[in-house]
């Protein structure tokens, strides 16, 4: 059986040893789950890029994809539908939805990358670029379905967002990944707009990695909510115990 070495920080290795955790069994289970999740996700990416595939006809796939999407990404896609009105939802509408959501990491990164979100939004709405609809989804504006009315490049951009999340090692799909997905669709309406604005995928990836590292550091340096209150309660109890011991002459 092939052997894979797993290296742990000293403190974690000591804790694992003290807890007598079966490292091999835990690692095998975690790797098996990860392989299954990544395999299913990559199949999802391929299917989303297939013009003949109808996601609404595969509710289990739609559910898996939705389960990986953040609430902000779902809200962004809903706003993209609103921006498109009765017409097809293209990549430029996805860009408008991402910007209109307002609080997501993708839109918050734009100023740091030298881009003005409002200017990009105006350019996206002013564009008249048209994109092809997938064969399977039927006419734009048909009733029901997260995917209904999405153009082929828009659907492919969501697939590229999933792929970007996998490449970055993230277990969710967020608006920052959608921004990378739109950049990946270079010939789409949003792809042209973002390229003309000077954005490139490498810079966005670096910004995402830097932002995520900053969030992780902030969490490490932040006292968890309620901790100070619990510490005060503990101190009061210890004071009470010390007082009773003193009264007993101990």
Image (spheres, rainbow, N blue to C red):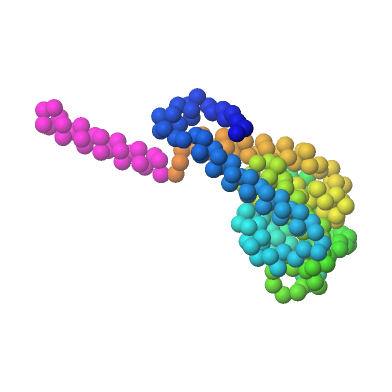
Give the image location of residue 60, x and y in percent.
64, 62
Residue found 45% across the figure and 41% down from its top: 224
- Residue 82 lies in quadrant: bottom right
Residue found 52% across the figure and 35% down from its top: 24
Of all residues shown, which one is farthest toward the bottom?
A: 143
Residue found 61% across the figure and 36% down from its top: 214
- Residue 89 lies in quadrant: bottom right
| Residue 113 appears in the picture as rendered | no
Give the image location of residue 80, x and y in percent.
74, 62
> In the shown orientation, is residue 75 left or right of residue 86?
left
Q: Which is the main secondary structure of the residues drawn in magenta?
A: helix
Location of the C terminus by quadrant is top left
Say if 169 sits above or below 148 in the image.
Answer: above
Of all residues shown, which one is farthest toward the front?
A: 1
Give the image location of residue 185, x and y in percent.
82, 51
Number of disc labels: 0
| Residue 211 appears in the picture as rendered | yes
Question: Which of 116 and 190 lies nearest the eye of the viewer?
Answer: 190
Location of the N terminus by quadrant is top right
Residue found 75% across the figure and 57% down from its top: 47
Give the image location of residue 119, x and y in percent.
80, 52
Question: Which of 207 and 35 lies nearest the eye of the viewer?
Answer: 35
Question: Which of 67 and 106 lies nearest the eye of the viewer?
Answer: 67
Of all residues shown, which one is farthest toward the top?
A: 10
Please provide the residue range marked out in magenta: 226-250
> In the shown orientation, is residue 160 left or right of residue 64?
right
Q: Is residue 248 magenta?
A: yes
Q: Is residue 102 magenta?
A: no
């Amino acid at each position: 059986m092939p052997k894979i070495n797993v290296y742990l920080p000293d403190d974690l290795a000591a804790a694992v040893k003290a807890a007598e955790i079966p490292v091999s069994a835990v690692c095998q289970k975690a790797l098996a789950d990860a392989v299954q999740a990544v395999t299913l996700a990559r199949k999802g990416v391929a299917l989303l890029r297939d013009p003949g595939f109808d996601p609404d006809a595969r509710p289990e796939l739609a559910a898996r994809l939705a389960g990986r999407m953040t609430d902000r990404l779902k809200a962004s896609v809903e706003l993209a539908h609103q921006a498109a009105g009765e017409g097809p939802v293209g990549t430029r509408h996805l860009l408008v939805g991402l910007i209109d959501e307002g609080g997501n990491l993708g839109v918050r990164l734009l100023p740091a990358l030298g881009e003005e979100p409002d200017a990009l939004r105006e350019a996206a709405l002013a564009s008249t670029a048209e994109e092809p609809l997938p064969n399977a989804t039927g006419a734009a504006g048909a009733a029901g379905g997260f995917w209904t009315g999405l153009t082929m490049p828009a659907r492919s951009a969501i697939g590229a967002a999933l792929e970007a999340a996998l490449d970055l090692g993230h277990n969710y799909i967020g608006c920052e990944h959608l921004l990378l997905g739109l950049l990946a669709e270079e010939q789409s309406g949003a792809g042209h707009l973002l390229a003309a604005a000077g954005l490139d995928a490498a810079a966005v990836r670096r910004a995402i990695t830097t932002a995520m590292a900053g969030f992780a550091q902030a969490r490490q340096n932040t006292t968890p909510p309620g901790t100070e209150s619990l510490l005060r309660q503990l101190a009061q109890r210890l004071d009470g115990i010390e007082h009773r011991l003193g009264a007993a002459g101990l």
